[in-house]
Amino acid sequence: MAKEMMLGALLPALSLAFNYAEMKLQLVKGTYCLDGSDAGYNYAAPSSGNSTRWVFFMQGGGACLGEDDCKNRAKTKLGTSNKWSQTVTLPNHFFDLDASHNPTFADAHHVYIPYGTGDTHKGTRMADATSFGLYFTGHTNFVNIMKALEAKYNLLSKSTAVLLLGSSAGGVGALSNADTLAEMFTVTPAPRFKTAPDAGFFFPNALPSDFPEHPEYPPSNYSCFAAGKHCGLRDLLQSWAPIPKYLRSPGCLAHYDDPTVCDSIGAAYPFIQTPVFLLENQYDTNQIYKQQGCPKTTDSMAVAYIRMYGEAMRNSTVGVLKDGDGLFSPSCLSHGVSTTIRINGTTLDPVLTDWFWGTGKLTQYYRLVEECPASAGGLPCNTQVASCTLSGGGGGDGCQKELEALGCLAGDGLNACEKCAEQHQSDVKKAGCTSDKISGLCTA
């Protein structure tokens, strides 16, 4: 999973044109990374000192599967706070301190929640012999972080507006933890609270032709699809889910006989009570290539799989979007929605701001789904970003191509990839890289 903010050493070089909040690390007792080190949050106080508005961003960075994978992860920034930076600057519109750019959240409490549990912020499992001695406590950490913020800054008892963001695994975390946070507020009336996850819709529901009896399962993986079978990712969910001990929606659990169905957002989304604005490309490369195993080729079977996956994503977002929820869904083969991409001439940030506050000036754009001409044949068609299409390189962009050319994506691991990018700051900056792009590509 990708598009995450992690590369602290590169941030100053990439953020000079903006005045983003510099958030300082605060560790919290009773929270744990995979290795047992304290987890926590990064925080920047509002300039006025008395704001009751909050913006959160949950970091992503994939998930670990299996003992070796998780133990290796526990030695990295994604598994131990011993390697976390003391300050984080997030290049995100809602963390901009310039009120002319970000008028409603410039003077807010800004909070960044680092990701150190490998469980998409959903785990509730303390370390024991059956969890390889590791802590999968992403959800437990989330709850305890909110309690710590209440104790220090009156988050739960005095807030008036709260926006919960996250990307990739952090987007999954935002979706999964939103209702928990909503239930924790004690202020009356409850604050305006909404969530806008980016690239967190893991996974869409299968098409009826894929799983006729169980369309609530994720789509078949590529190997099954190519063999004409209906299988794949659902089996992985079933085999892995008991180990981390995931948070699951009570409404979803009551609806389905198989509890692991509720580990997929496509099945869980209809039961989320918090207002949601989904930011999701129709053709998510992390899901299609990394999770589902589709080869990065343009042969007929791979193209057919990409076409199927895009249809499944549209059906699972457009088809079930709840009243009051929003959707920004470009026809793009990429992981993470670009802040510069347009649908019908409209970019995301002003629409998301208008939706959050309910001002109604941009209501007609609350559900933007890019539609392609018949000549596109059901494949990604956005041409503003060349890499959105198959002919544009299968979801890559200038940043990805530069990192590939430099050898940073050669498969030597997350730390080596980030170090490589840091050593070539000038080149990667010219290629349009930002720290969140780099982190995302290095963990993809």
Image: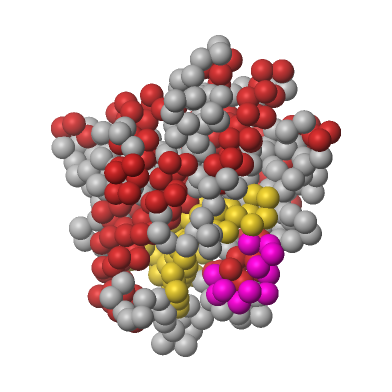
Q: Looking at this view, name the residue that lies furthest to the left.
A: 129
- Visible residue check, residue 413: no
Q: Quadrant of residue 340?
A: bottom right
The colour scheme is: secondary structure
Residue situated in front as seen by the camera: 204 or 90: 204
Give the quarter of the figure containing the C terminus: top right
Residue situated in front as seen by the camera: 147 or 75: 147
Q: Quadrant of residue 313?
A: top right
- Residue at (32%, 60%) from the top-left corner? 180
- Visible residue check, residue 275: yes
The picture places residue 358, in percent across and down from the top left corner, at: 57, 74
Residue situated in front as seen by the camera: 249 or 286: 249
Tell me: residue 379, above or below residue 165.
above
The verdict on residue 360 being magenta is yes
Q: Which residues are magenta?
A: 356-366
The picture places residue 97, in percent across and down from the top left corner, at: 57, 76
- Residue at (22%, 34%) from the top-left corner? 131
- Residue at (44%, 48%) from the top-left corner? 269
Q: Looking at this view, name the residue that lies furthest to the right.
A: 375
Tell me: residue 409, above or below residue 171.
above
The picture places residue 404, in percent across and down from the top left corner, at: 66, 34
Callout count: 0
The verdict on residue 337 being magenta is no
Residue situated in front as seen by the camera: 325 or 172: 325
Tell me: residue 297, above or below residue 35.
above
Tell me: residue 60, above or below residue 112.
above
- Residue at (44%, 69%) from the top-left corner? 193
Left or right: residue 376 compared with residue 195: right
The picture places residue 260, in percent across and down from the top left corner, at: 33, 34
